[in-house]
Amino acid sequence: INCIENLCNEILFEIFDYLDGYDIYKAFSNLNIRLENLLISSSLSMKIEISSNTIFDFHYKQFLKCTFNQLTIILLHAPRLSHLHCVNIIESKDHSKSELMIKLHSLTHLTMTLYNLEFDDFEEFLLKLCSPLQLFDAKIKSRDRSYLNADRWERFISQNMTSLIRFTFRYSDIIDDEFELTFYHSLINRFTSSFSIDRKWFFKLFIEENELIYSIRQYQETWIDFQEYLHINQNTKNNINDSLNPYFPVVELSIIRTCLTENDEPLINKINFIFNMIKVTYLDIECDQMTVSMLITILHSLINLNSITLSNSALCQQMDLSIRDKIIFNAFLNTNKISKITLQNVTENDQIESIFKYFPRIHFLDYNV
């Protein structure tokens, strides 16, 4: 029979690695002098999560829904921090800027969710970190469209994040009555520059209800790439810089909504300019209900498509088109470049046959029941 306080330090450190920092202190701080000294050891690194779901916020409630100024003060007391995950970071109400430099030389992983914060303030905060970041994940909801300045991101990362390996970026644009196209919207094609492609960072657009989301993510192979693996040289496939490779999905557009009808056409018209600014080559539609007219409008706007994924597609249903829709759809059929299609929840043979009729250039077809 043995006791936990008799375990060697190495085993205790391994146990602590599975626990939250607050839970470690709560469980072990008052057991004996040896464990007390171990908890304040310079070689012990702990994970601390500030969450409204734990008792921790009862003691530190003033630090929750947290401003940038408050976060700066907290970080000054954590010089050996290696991983930082922050959500609900908001703009400071007093607008006073801290001049303190936060030297976190061990910080390699940073994940943040920001609300209503200007890019200038966020950039200033990142400059103060003086950290060798390897993973940087930023989710942003703000009216400041300068976050869409890809060239500014490129300059900042090149000069200040030289160790960065993985970059994830997600900016949400609300499509409401106040939505207006800006100069920065015209720059989004720069997110597909060689700087991003060389690092295997790829650009994707999401339409989720009334939000247009711009995303940078690490490249992940899809079924399209797997199918092409069977037909093209592996070395060519791995060369993601090869712009002559027509099978590589450079830009994705994902539409995730409960329904899309003619009532949503003003939303599509508002962002149609953005479709023209960037070459969307892969379209993924996850929509329970979609009218044929809306699908035709979307397809007609994306002239560079070569791959699509359709769920409960209106194209698989009986089409009764207006004269206007017939003209638009016929123009699309004559010029479309779509050669790869995935179908979701399509089971009838006549539905699949209709796809071949509308897309005669198909090379690959995959369907999931």
Image (tube, grey):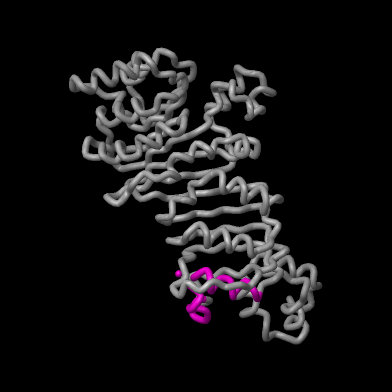
- Whether 58 is among the magenta residues is yes
Residue 111 higher or lower than 90, as above or below: above
Residue 277 as seen in the image, left or right of residue 354: right
**Is residue 366 visible to the viewer in this orientation of the structure?**
no
Q: Position of residue 197 (x, y in %)?
A: 61, 35
Residue 17 as seen in the image, left or right of residue 176: right
Q: Which residues are magenta?
A: 57-77
Residue 147 as seen in the image, left or right of residue 327: right
Q: Position of residue 187 (x, y in %)?
A: 48, 40
Residue at 67% in and 69% down: 46
- Whether 35 is among the magenta residues is no
Could you say which quadrant of the image residue 329 lies in? top left
Q: Position of residue 53 (x, y in %)?
A: 47, 70
Q: Residue furthest front?
A: 183
Residue at 37% in and 37% down: 286
Residue 34 higher or lower than 289, as above or below: below
